[in-house]
């Protein structure tokens, strides 16, 4: 398990599947899988995310998904992890 803190967000993995992304008091669990292929190290199912887990029910719009994507990319780049 590792986490990467940057600006005002945290990306934390636990095990081979799933990650927790948080911004301030907002948190969301995102499905992911480690891969063994040569092209990518990880697949993250960001499209399946529709609302924050905490606080419950707050929807996540396209602009927020874009920001989350950029933040996860930034966090993983420091670990030399390529994702799709």
Image (spheres, rainbow, N blue to C red):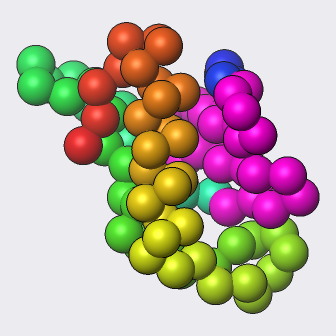
Q: Is residue 14 visible?
A: no
- The question of residue 24 being in magenta is answered with yes
Q: Work out whether residue 4 or residue 41 is closer to the camera in this orientation and state it.
A: 4
Q: In which image quadrant can residue 12 be found?
A: top right
16 up-or-down from 54: above or below? above
- The question of residue 40 being in magenta is answered with no
State the residue at coordinates (85%, 52%): 24
Q: Work out whether residue 30 or residue 63 is closer to the camera in this orientation and state it.
A: 63
Instruction: Tell me where the magenta segment starts and ends, as one range.
Output: 5-28
Q: Where's residue 18, x and y in %?
A: 54, 47
Q: In which image quadrant can residue 19 be found?
A: top right
State the residue at coordinates (47%, 12%): 79
State the residue at coordinates (73%, 84%): 58
The image quadrant where one finds the C terminus is top left
Q: Work out whether residue 80 or residue 63 is closer to the camera in this orientation and state it.
A: 63
Q: Residue pushed farthest left?
A: 38
Q: Where's residue 60, x and y in %?
A: 58, 77
14 up-or-down from 60: above or below? above
Q: Main secondary structure of the magenta part?
A: strand
């Amino acid at each position: 398990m590792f986490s990467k803190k940057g600006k005002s967000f945290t990306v934390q993995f636990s095990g081979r599947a799933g990650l927790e992304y948080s911004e301030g008091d907002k948190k969301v669990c995102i499905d992911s899988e480690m891969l063994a292929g040569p092209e990518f190290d990880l697949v993250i199912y960001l499209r399946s995310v529709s609302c924050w887990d905490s606080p419950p029910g707050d929807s996540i719009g396209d602009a927020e998904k874009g920001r989350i994507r950029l933040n996860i990319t930034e966090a993983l780049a420091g670990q030399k992890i390529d994702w799709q």
